[in-house]
Amino acid sequence: MRKLVLLLIIIAVSPVGAEEGFRPWKTFKGTDFDAFLKNIYKRDIESGRLIGYDPAFPAETLKLSKEQMEWLQSKGAGEKSLRAVKLTVKVYPQADPNVRKSKKSEPKQVDMDFPLLFFSDEDQGYVLDWDWRQKRQTFFDSSLQVVLGEERDMQKERRQPGPQYDLIYLREGSRSFKIKGVVQNSRFALRSNYGRFEVNRDRLAGIQFRDESGGLDVVIGVNNNRLSGFLGLPADPNTGARINLLTYEGENGDKQEVRKEKVSRIIFRVREDELNGLGGDNTVYVRLKNGDAFDARIPEGEFKLGGRSERVADVRRVVIKDGIPTFMLKTGSNPPGEFSTPDLPFELELGPQIQIYSKHLEQISCEPTYRPVGRIVEASDDGDVRLSFQKNPAQGKVLSVSSRSAFGTLMEKGDRIVSINGRIPEFPTKGDDSYELACEALFEGKTIPKIVLGVERGTHVFHLTIIRLSGV
Amino acid sequence: MFRFVFLVLFLFEASLSGEHVREWKNLKGQVIKATLQDFKTESAGEGKDTVASANKSRKDDLVQLEVVIPRGKTVEKEPSHKKVYDIPFPDFSDDDKEYILDWHWSRHRQAFFDSCLQVVQGEQRAIRTTRRTKEGEPPKPLSDRVYLRDGSEIDGVVKNSLFSIHTTYGEFDLELERLASIQFGDGLSTHDVLTGVNKNRFSGFLGFPASPGNTKANFLTFETVNGAREIRREEVLRIIFQVREEELAGLYHDTSVSVRLRNNDYFDATVHGGQLPVGNRTILVSEVKHVLFEGTQSAVILKNGGRENLSFPEEDLPMKLDLGPEIKIFQGHLDRLNCDPDFRPIGTVIEAESERAANISFESDLPGRVRSISSSSIFNELLQKDDRIVSINGRIPEFPDKGDDSYEKALDALFNKKKEPISHVELGVQRGKQLFFQITIVRKDGTDA
């Protein structure tokens, strides 16, 4: 019993991400861990479901024997803290030798901590992988993994071979090819129809360059913000990047330069710190008439109106028509008002501070849960947004759009759905596909508030957000 | 003697300059018929000239009249003969002096009238075409016309002296005096478009730089009859600038060529100093017909039929625009250089084999509105039903219900077999409220005009 107390540490079950299943474990010697436990506790203990890992667990809490501590220290463990694994194990009642056993008793599930070094190398790797994923789960869930219909290079596993690369698409006449590298230009200058500003590379997920015949360059932020205009590559003395040249380090480490006019697209790799400082509660989501949209802070947290102000925290949404705002307050009232200045200041989450002429604005959403991407399509049921797709190999290519569809003219025959809710969709020839599943979740299960579609038309990608007619 | 001759001279034929016979009076009210041929003066042609000022300053100015001296009472039997006389300007009556000054004013400007851009974006620019009004008064000052997005129009004189444009191929400033119009984009599918007085087109994002003490950044400032006004750039839809008499001064250099870009912009510029590097030598643009840019290759087509490869060492070609700025353009943006000074096509160039091939049918009750475009038409995918032809060869077209219209006449002239055909037909096309574009129709190579 004492030994059991020595080793068993029962703690409150802490919430974790995806629950692991019970699995067999092996000791550092490669033997069965259950047998090892049975030997120590003199009863049946079945290992275990991984529920935690602590790289600096207080050694004394484990109440290990002197021999065990010496052994652990000889393997590199610290005197006061060591790496510990928390497992939920099945502990069976101690068998009474005087009672004839009819059937095995029901075990209790108990959470126990063990030194990581007690386990086999393979199991240690399993624990460390699991912990690595656990720590990044929130980031994985919130990071933009698909941009412009393409998967960004990303470290999804601890032992995934690295490094990660940016994907650079080049055009040479009518030919197009892609290369892997790490973009060195640290800043990108954008001249949009609402201003001129610079965006830091580390806040960018993708860039779609205009083609020779015209159009605009489109910059996609790591927070899925969209900014369009003429993109400039300023000189950067810190990285040695020269003006108008995209500088990147190739897979072999060589520094390469290419004219920006020869670049058609960049898909930036996912960087672990790219979302740091983003997604604050006090941000608003600004949609412009030209289709651009971004997260920003309103200086001092309030909209300045003629003679009064409205606190951003009190506002659900602001709908702007011809520069005149209609405030929809959380209280349900819609007080009239006019902006006190024709240009509204915004501090973009992506960095720059800009002023935007009120007539460029379409909507400002102050609710963190309502951030529609691209054009909004309202539908009462999945029939309103039904799409038929061409069969393989034209994955996701729209065959036709009904004239009664809620998409109206937004979607055309030949458009290709390249992302659904931030993930690459699957369009098998038979059975449910990603789009049908998403529609079911939105309209029948009502388990998701919206469907964000990435749609490729020609060389450009645009987004549509489908919401239920009643709103999110 | 001279006065006697002047008294009895009569004239009946139109002169070489196209003038008609008219009656002339001297200071004593005596009448002759004569054709005005020339006005020999060093200071005439100024719009501000009046008879009163001319009387003071033009004692030595001579008016050349071609007069016909009758020889008898019956013209048929004794035909008159022509004789040219130089007559001092002060000897004419005030009415004749006005006529002389009008004639000279117009003649002095004829070349400008012929070459200036009078219609832009399908609209007539305000232009002074006479020295004085029909009532004899000095003409009113001209105005620029400003169209606002709220549908209103304002006449005034724009004060912003400089406009900056950020294009796909660079950023530069253009002076007001070199602009014929500005069409502002919708921020979605269309950009701002500047049209120069030489028809050059630049598209991109337009900026209104501040000019200390004159204009504020992002504001259009203009003077109206009711005083100065300032309007936000975003409120303006279109500006049609007045024709200024000096606006073409210094344009059309011998070395300049027509540069056409892949984004459909085009402008006149002197490229690489007017000498194109070919191999180890350079050739003058005057020897070149055109230069084609295809991918990384660029072919120089010489007037003598030869073909060379352009060998610019730099990726960016230096150019001095006729309209002022010096810029460098990445070769990948270039589509073509037309070096023939007589061929400066605007907009999309369409080749037509025949008059019939270039035929367009118009709505009978909606002037200039395109009825339909067949899939086999050379305009297929370029023109659409309901597009409106708003200018033809730089003039507002006429589309009467019956008979010839401006478009048919222009095609006649393009494919004329009886006399020297015109080289091309320029169409200005309006689509909806926002989109204006241009098409140049040329005869297909080898087409017999």
Image (tube, coloured by chain):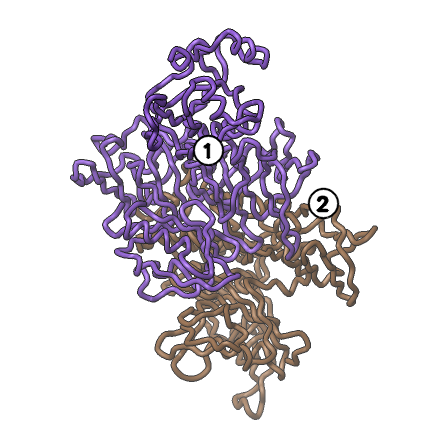
Chain colours: A purple, B brown
* Chain of the residue under the numbered disc 1 shown in the image: A
Within-10-Å neighbours for mark 2: few <14, some 14–19, many 20+: few
Q: Amino acid at mark 1?
A: Arg
Question: Where in the figure is residue B309, as x and y percent of width and height?
Answer: 77, 57
Question: Which image quarter: residue B199?
Answer: bottom right
In the rendered view, would you say B263 is above or below A307?
below
Q: Residue at x 44, y 61 (%)?
A: A430
State whether residue A88 appears in this view. Answer: yes
Q: Which residue is mark 2?
A: B314
Frontmost residue, A286 versus A170:
A170
Pinpoint residue B201: horizontal percent, then vertical percent: 53, 55
**Viewer-side label of 2, 1:** 1
Quadrant placement of the C terminus of chain B: bottom right
Residue contact at pointers 2 and 1, CB within 8 angstroms: no
- Say which of B311 and B35 sits in front: B311
Residue B196 in sight in this render:
no
Residue bearing the label numbered 1: A23
Q: CA distance from mark 2 to mark 1?
A: 66 Å
Up/down of B126 relative to A84, above or below: below
- A42 or A196, which is in the foreground? A42
Residue that appears at 42% across and 35% down: A21
For numbered disc 2, what is the local secondary structure? Answer: loop
- Please name the residue shown 53% across and 75% down the image: B34
Residue situated furthest right in the rendering: B280
